[in-house]
Image (tube, rainbow, N blue to C red):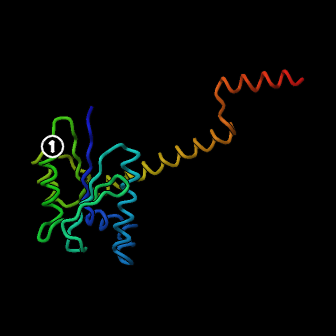
Amino acid sequence: MTHDILLVDGYNIIGAWAELQSLSKQDFSLARDRLVDMMAEYAAYMGHEVHIVFDAHQVGGVGKHALHHRVHVIYTRKKETADERIEKLVTTMKRIDRRIYVATSDFAEQSVIFGSGALRKSAHELQREMKLVMKGIDKTIEKKQRTQQSSKIQLSTEVAEVFERWRREGK
């Protein structure tokens, strides 16, 4: 079974997606948080392991790694770019039973990614996938709500038989 990993160049995606770009002009940390939330939904729906890499020059906590909603959030060390960290991650994570995707629209980074054995997703491709994920989540929620409404209480067969017996005995 193949285990898929998605490495996301955080600031590249924020700069490429209109919603996040607009949010970053108001509050950059809010745009980062929104990307993490979106990637958590992506990870849960797709079943992928997701790592978002941010350049440290935009934040404090240089060289920090945290886990938020099952998404690995990585801030590079001082003088280390997100591209460099992503390249290192691809090298260390590469195995025969894994597919590693890197989400970036940085052309130079894409060339290096191919050379190291990872697959690329442009920011546009990831955004298209994210829209499909959100539609899938909405459909799943809608279906679950319909099921809950149509059968107010789910009863096991045994419980339903007991209730039926009580109903007959009461007549």
Q: Amino acid at mark 1?
A: Lys
Q: Residue reaching furthest right? A: 171
Residue that appears at 77% across and 23% down: 164
Q: Quadrant of the C terminus?
A: top right
* Residue 79 placement (x, y as % from top left): 11, 71
147 or 122: nearer the viewer: 147
Residue picked out by circle 1: 94
Of residues 169 and 56, the one drawn nearer to the viewer in this rendering: 169
Q: Quadrant of the N terminus?
A: top left
- Residue 127 vertical position relative to residue 12 in the rendered view, above or below: above
* Residue toward you, 121 or 158: 158
- Decide: few, some or many residues near mark 1? Use Cα within 10 Å; few <14, some 14-19, many ≥20: some
Residue at image position (40%, 67%) is: 19
Q: Position of residue 68 (x, y in %)?
A: 35, 58
- Where residue 40 appears, as percent x and y from the top left, is 38, 54
> What x and y, as percent, mark residue 132?
42, 48
